[in-house]
Amino acid sequence: MYSWLYDRLNSVHDRLDSVHGTFVIIFVKMIVRGKTALLAMAGVTVAIFTSVFLAVQMLHVTTSDETKQLQLVHVVIRHGARTPVSTYPNDPYINATLFPIGWGQLTNEGKLSLFNIGKFLRERYGSFLGTYYSPDKFYTQSTDTDRTKASMQLVNAGLWPPESVQKWGPIDWQPIPVQSEPLDQDMLLLVRQPCAQYHIERDRIMKSEEVQKLFQEYEPLFREITEITGQNVSDFDDIQDVFSTIQAEESFNLILPEWTKSYYPDKMLRPTILSYVLNAYNDKMNRLKRGTILFFPFILGVLLKKIITDWTDKTNGTLSPTDRQAFLYGGHDSTISNLMRTLKVWDPQLPVYGITVLLELYKDLTTDAYGVEIYLRNNTEVPPYKMTIPGCDSFCPLEKLLELTKNVIPENWEEECKTDDATYAVPDLGRP
Ligand SMILES: *[C@@H]1O[C@H](CO)[C@@H](O)[C@H](O)[C@H]1NC(C)=O
Ligand SMILES: *[C@@H]1O[C@H](CO)[C@@H](O)[C@H](O)[C@H]1NC(C)=O
Ligand SMILES: *[C@@H]1O[C@H](CO)[C@@H](O)[C@H](O)[C@H]1NC(C)=O
Ligand SMILES: *[C@@H]1O[C@H](CO)[C@@H](O)[C@H](O)[C@H]1NC(C)=O
């Protein structure tokens, strides 16, 4: 008779961290189980307090679990900790083989943290996704680099351990396919096709008074890092490059050269963070310049466009396959910062290894309206941060979200990227 209540208590229990909460719940479980002798011992006051406490908690569970229902999830993750992808002329490790994995590959620490992200996703979405993996239900795509493809395999290892009918052999793992587009054709997770307008506008931003002031402020640092590293460091991206190399060497447990003590991470951190901001300059900063700078954030909005299309398809019942419940995407630091910046929810920060964006489409069961919640997980010690799109609530109705993001969604990417200047040559982007 009390089993419903007992289940409820367990679910409330799961939500409580405090010792006090645990005591109260255990105590009430005893009551539910009929240990009336204990009830008598504890006295009426505690019982009353408990009822009130419980009523409040149950109300909370009801509102958060039952008035809206999860419909579709997109998870976007940066690859895990890796060995360096690049070096600099005076790098003591310039000739290192980085045995046994080589350059630009996941470290063991990186592998473990990705596996744990998969376990986190199982915990968060297990009841939504169910026990069994199926390719209709769950789709994984990564950029075409070793470290992102390996990362997604690890996340899926944590998320989809085979159960009963899916157990197949001696290890607690099952293969989950990871799709990818060749780097030069990727129009979703890491767009590296030439887009003249993007670079033209970016150059203009770099030359703006506001950004030039930043250049002046950091000029001495650029000069010092150039001297020390033997590498031409002349802008924020160059600092980011050196920063990433040092960070990667550190995460592979290499002993960092002495000079880094006075520069890394402290002095180099802010200009590195700035590089992610300047590469996806937004309206807010533009307004500071009285709208004289035009920037084309929609060029970066390809991933958001795909996600929004999935949302509207899901609400219209036209998402294919119909059973699709989640998309897992693996990309790079810029995949995350560009996505968040097109949504205007990027708080300038270093996009750490394994940084994860959770985009959740819900149906409000009382109104039948659809809405979206967006979370950023940049720290494994605390729950993911719930982000609020400017102009919306943290539960953002889909219709409103479509309105708010209209001007960051490319309609015809190729057309919008073109320039009239036939002589304009798009700079080479190099390898990711
Ligand atoms: C790396 O190799 C080059 C060419 O063999 C050599 O000149 C240089 O001294 C080496 N640098 C380091 C740091 O080992
Ligand atoms: C460093 O790079 C900047 C920008 O690419 C260039 O203008 C400058 O001439 C370069 N300096 C050296 C010493 O190569
Ligand atoms: C699909 O859904 C969106 C938003 O939910 C709506 O604006 C659009 O008109 C719908 N399209 C069709 C074909 O029903
Ligand atoms: C993590 O993200 C949140 C939300 O954007 C931000 O407030 C916080 O500063 C970030 N943490 C770090 C260490 O950057």
Image (tube, rainbow, N blue to C red):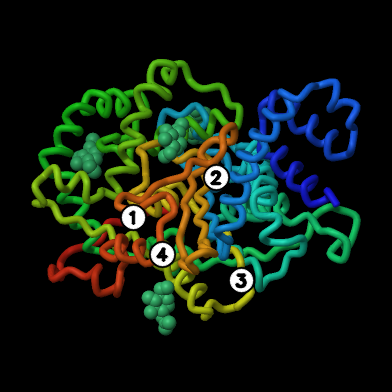
Q: Is residue 312 above or below residue 74?
A: below
Select label 3 or label 1 by which is in front. 3
Q: Secondary structure at mark 4?
A: helix
Q: Amino acid at mark 3?
A: Arg
Query: Label 1, label 4: how many angstroms apart (C-alpha)?
Result: 16 Å
Secondary structure state at the residue bearing disc 1: helix
Residue 383: % across, % down: 56, 38
* Residue 342, label in figure: 1
Please name the amino acid that badge 4 sits on.
Leu
Amino acid type shown at disc 2: Gly
- CB at disc 4 and ligand 3 closer than 8 Å: yes
Q: Marks 1/2: CA distance?
A: 28 Å
Numbered disc in front, either 1 or 4: 4
Left/right of residue 17 with respect to residue 295 in the rendered view: right
Residue in the foreground of this view, choosing between 388 and 176: 388
Kindly identify which residue carries mark 3. Answer: 324
Distance in Å between CA atoms under marks 3 and 4:
19 Å
**At numbered mark 2, what does the secondary structure look like: helix, strand or loop?**
loop
Q: Earlier in the sequence, mark 1 or mark 2?
A: 2
Q: Position of residue 10 (x, y in %)?
A: 76, 42
> Which callout, 1 or 2, points to the residue nearer the camera?
1
Relative to 60, is 382 above or below? above
Name the mark on residue 398.
4
